[in-house]
């Protein structure tokens, strides 16, 4: 993920997903803020993203699509409330990304069973490689 446009696209997708249940919870906002900082966006630019609707740039590599799926899943679980709309939306996003639906369901199940929704990176990748 090298370009400003690619980074912006990833963050905009996460912002759109965070409000799919109709609310932006404080923990979701804080998580998004951390991701924005990791992507080198300052707080002014980050806040402005909430007022933008730009076309998403497709993620080219499977590894990057898996990373983005996992980020979205972490965002989904970070507020401690799993909404039906979020569960449906993340499955649809995964399909649109071209990810294996069986693998994504397994990942979400493992995350739901984990105490903090975090699973080991090696487990994550192994499930997609099966």
Image: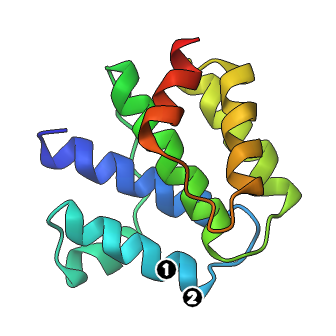
Residue visible at 28% across and 68% down?
36
Q: Residue furthest top?
A: 130
- Looking at the image, residue 54 lies above or below residue 128: below
Q: Nearer the viewer, residue 54 or 104?
A: 104
Q: Give the number of the disc on residue 64.
A: none
Work out whether residue 48 can be spotted. Answer: no
Work out whether residue 12 can be spotted. Answer: yes
Between marks 1 and 2, how big is the CA–CA gap?
A: 5 Å
The residue indicated by pointer 2 is 26
The residue indicated by pointer 1 is 29
Left or right, 111 with respect to 33, comes to: right
For the residues bearing labels 1 and 2, Cβ distance under 8 angstroms = yes
- Mark 1: secondary structure: helix
Residue visible at 35% across and 76% down?
33
- Looking at the image, residue 50 lies above or below residue 26: above
Quadrant of the drawing holding the C terminus: top right
């Amino acid at each position: 993920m090298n370009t400003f446009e690619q980074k912006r696209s990833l963050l905009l997708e996460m912002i759109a997903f965070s409000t799919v249940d109709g609310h932006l919870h404080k923990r979701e906002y804080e998580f998004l803020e951390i991701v924005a900082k990791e992507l080198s966006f300052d707080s002014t630019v980050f806040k402005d993203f909430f007022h933008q609707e730009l076309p998403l740039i497709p993620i080219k590599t499977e590894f990057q699509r898996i990373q983005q799926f996992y980020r979205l899943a972490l965002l989904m679980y970070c507020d401690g409330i799993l909404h039906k709309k979020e569960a449906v939306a993340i499955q649809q996003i995964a399909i649109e990304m071209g990810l294996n639906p069986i693998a994504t369901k397994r990942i979400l199940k493992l995350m739901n069973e984990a105490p903090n929704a975090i699973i080991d990176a090696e487990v994550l990748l192994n499930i997609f490689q099966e």
